[in-house]
Image: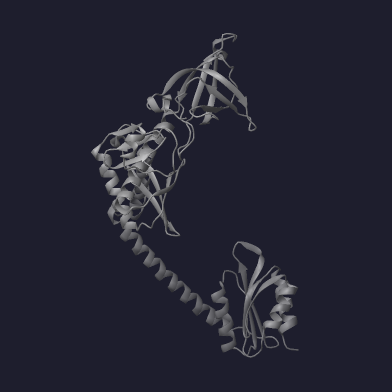
Amino acid sequence: METFDELYYTEPYLREFDATVTSCTPQKDGSFAIGLSQTAFYPTGGGQPGDRGTLSYEDPAAEDEESAQVVAKVHEAIPGEEPGTVLHLADRALPVGTTVHGTLDWTWRRDNMEAHTGEHIVSGIVHALFGYSNIGFHMGDRCIEVDFDGVLAPDEVLDVERRANAAVREDVPVEALLPSPEELETMDYRSKKEHEGQIRIVKIGDVDTCACCGTHVSSSGQVGLIKVLRITTKKKKTRLELLCGRRALETCEDLMGKLRDVSNFLSVGDEEVPEAVHRLSDEKDDYKHQLKQAARDRIAQEAATLVPEGGLVVHYEEGLDIDLLRHLCEQALEKTDAKVCAALSDVPGDPARIAYVIASAEDDLRASCKLLNKRLSGRGGGKPQMVQGSWACTREDAEAALKELLASA
């Protein structure tokens, strides 16, 4: 039964400690699972990743001072088989019975304490406002993912975020309680599942009360900042991606730096960037339209100069998209004596393929298209008087096949 008397619970701000190695077992991945007489390393669980750090000791048998310091790097702490036990997955073995000095990666631990506390604040507010339960929770290297069993609109999430940061500014106490069964019956608290034995309750002022086995900061103000990065809604559920504390601050600093780069590039103030970007987008669309029209006008002029051979026009030009290829065929049929026009171009990013559009004033081209695709390792199709696609062949092979199959004798 969990007693919650481990160091990571009783002294969550403890960064260093001494302990005795009680076990050391090699793992399949080459690491070693090290057990200790006590530990401040929080083991992976409840959505919170395990702590990282080092275990070290002085080797009295070492030949010099440099080699005397033995350091094992712990990349993750995980729960042991017995409740309250922890295994430290390290890069080297440590002798059983040795007294070691444990040092936590404090940045990692503090980030997780801020993140877990921030998640409680957000989940408590969502539950109070909408009645939704937290049905999934994961703390990763990039962000926190929290799943709720209801749909949250963007304006509702913004309201939750503002309320959460207001709770942070109020700096209310974060308490870890171990109520008796009788006391627990009178408490209104959130819980994802049924628990047996002693239940640990984390209470954050009047903002949230929740059954939890994670580590937390001692007051809401120490979370610093809560920022919602992304909202995803699927099957009447909502996922929020959050950042808290140092990670939220660094992300905001990074985004502000990028905004400043954009505003400097556009020679406008930071607050004017959205308007300037919309203006540039509109101008770009206008220029694209003008260029497209100029290309269509040029194609129309060029099509009028094409000379059919056996009623067939075959024209290759690099850089034409399917729309311009179709336009070339239409103009050639309209402005020349051609019965059939085949317009060819390169396929962007695939120099081994040829894009094609074939149009006819009268004939059904679908049978010829199938023959050409088979002969030239191609794919495509379309309507009776116009087909399109691409072939895996050279320009010369494509032109020769077209003339052989489509030109009149």
Left or right of 366? Residue 149 is left
Residue 390 visible in image: yes
Residue 325, quarter of the rendered image: bottom right
Residue extending furthest front?
182
Left or right of 15? Residue 328 is right
Q: Is residue 206 above or below residue 26?
A: below
**Residue nearer the viewer, 266 or 302:** 266
**Residue nearer the viewer, 275 or 178:** 178
Position of residue 406 measured from the top left corner of the image (x, y, whole percent): 71, 84
Left or right of 49? Residue 362 is right
Position of residue 115 measured from the top left corner of the image (x, y, whole percent): 38, 39
Q: Is residue 383 above or below residue 98?
A: below
Residue extending furthest left?
170
Residue 77 visible in image: no
Q: Coloring scheme of the render?
A: one colour
**Residue nearer the viewer, 301 or 398:** 398
Task: Say which residue appears at 60% left-offset and 88% top-offset.
Answer: 336
Q: Is residue 276 above or below residue 13?
A: below
Numbered marks: total: 0
Quadrant containing the C terminus is bottom right
Position of residue 278 measured from the top left corner of the image (x, y, whole percent): 35, 63
Task: Say which residue appears at 70% left-offset and 67% top-offset.
Answer: 392
Q: Is residue 409 above or below residue 186?
A: below
Left or right of 185? Residue 375 is right
